Image (cartoon, rainbow, N blue to C red):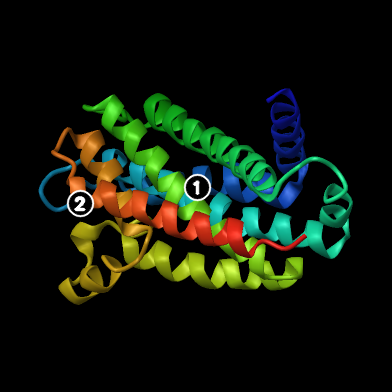
Amino acid sequence: MKGIIQIVAVELRLAVRDPMSAFFALAFPALMLWVKLRTGRPLPGGLPAVDATVPMLSVFVIGLASLVILPATLAQYRERGVLKRLRATPASPAMLLGAQWAAHMLLAVLGTALLIAIGLAGYGLAAPANVAGVLLAWTLGALSLSAIGLLIGALVPGGRGATVIGLSVFFPMVFLSGAMIPRETMSGSMRAIGDLTPMAPAVEAIRAGWAGDAMSPVTLGVMLAIFVVAGGVAARVFRW
């Protein structure tokens, strides 16, 4: 356990010190929050824009850390021979993948906390009506999306390829799932397509918990199923 904690701490420091990772996981979502809230107009139905935007962008942060930064890190380690050297240690694939997941999810926690702090201090963000529900939804969203990221990192041999694939998966999901554009302003066909993406359940559940609405057990179950299936496959096909 002590060794895992040390690995997680080192990986988190490396992620925060990397200019690109730190910018896109921490500064870029905060900049997007400012851009989206400049008008301050409520959404259809009267919901204040900030109360929808912060939960939405929290999924953006999770997705960026899970689908872009995490698989690129794993693939770069493989490309540079770091994983080959780790193979000589007692570390198992499950231990390595778990440590990488924990470090990048802590990066997402920092990005989400920054969004919430800005929303509370500058835009009158309402506190979540169901804190436990938001935490549960956030965790399941992080588990499901990071499992997909781990699968990409387990299969793609090089960092550049992992980045391209991660971005190719990330951007369509962000725009279709409601993590970037409020679902209330989407057309019916766009929402229907977005509902098929793995990111949509996280957006739906976190927003529901924040507003105090009932969270669908099916939505939570979908995220758990994605985590189990994608995470299991990632651990199985992982190559040093």
* Element type where label 2 sits in the image: helix
104 or 99: nearer the viewer = 99
Horizontal arrangement in the rendering, residue 132 relative to residue 31 (left or right): left
161 or 181: nearer the viewer = 161
Q: Is residue 194 above or below residue 227?
A: below
> In this rendering, which labeled residue sits more in front, label 1 or label 2?
2
Type of amino acid under label 2: Val
Asked whether residue 13 appears in the rendered view, the answer is yes
Q: Is residue 29 above or below residue 229?
A: above
The answer for how far apart the CA atoms under marks 1 and 2 are is 23 Å
* Residue drawn where x is 51% and y is 47% of the image: 29
The residue tagged 2 is 218
* Residue drawn where x is 71% and y is 52% of the image: 20
The quarter of the displayed image where residue 1 is located: top right
Q: Position of residue 135 (x, y in %)?
A: 36, 31
Q: Quadrant of the C terminus?
A: bottom right
Asked whether residue 49 appears in the rendered view, the answer is no
* Residue drawn where x is 88% and y is 48% of the image: 88
The residue tagged 1 is 61
Horizontal arrangement in the rendering, residue 233 relative to residue 59 (left or right): right
> Disc 1, disc 2: CB below 8 Å?
no
Q: Earlier in the sequence, mark 1 or mark 2?
A: 1
Q: Which mark is residue 207?
A: none
The quarter of the displayed image where residue 37 is located: top left
Type of amino acid under label 1: Val
* Residue drawn where x is 51% and y is 56% of the image: 232
165 or 171: nearer the viewer = 165
Number of marks in the rendered image: 2
Within 10 Å of disc 1 (Cα), the crowding (few <14, some 14-19, many 20+) is many
Horizontal arrangement in the rendering, residue 201 relative to residue 13 (left or right): left
The quarter of the displayed image where residue 151 is located: bottom right
Query: Outermost residue, left direction?
Result: 45
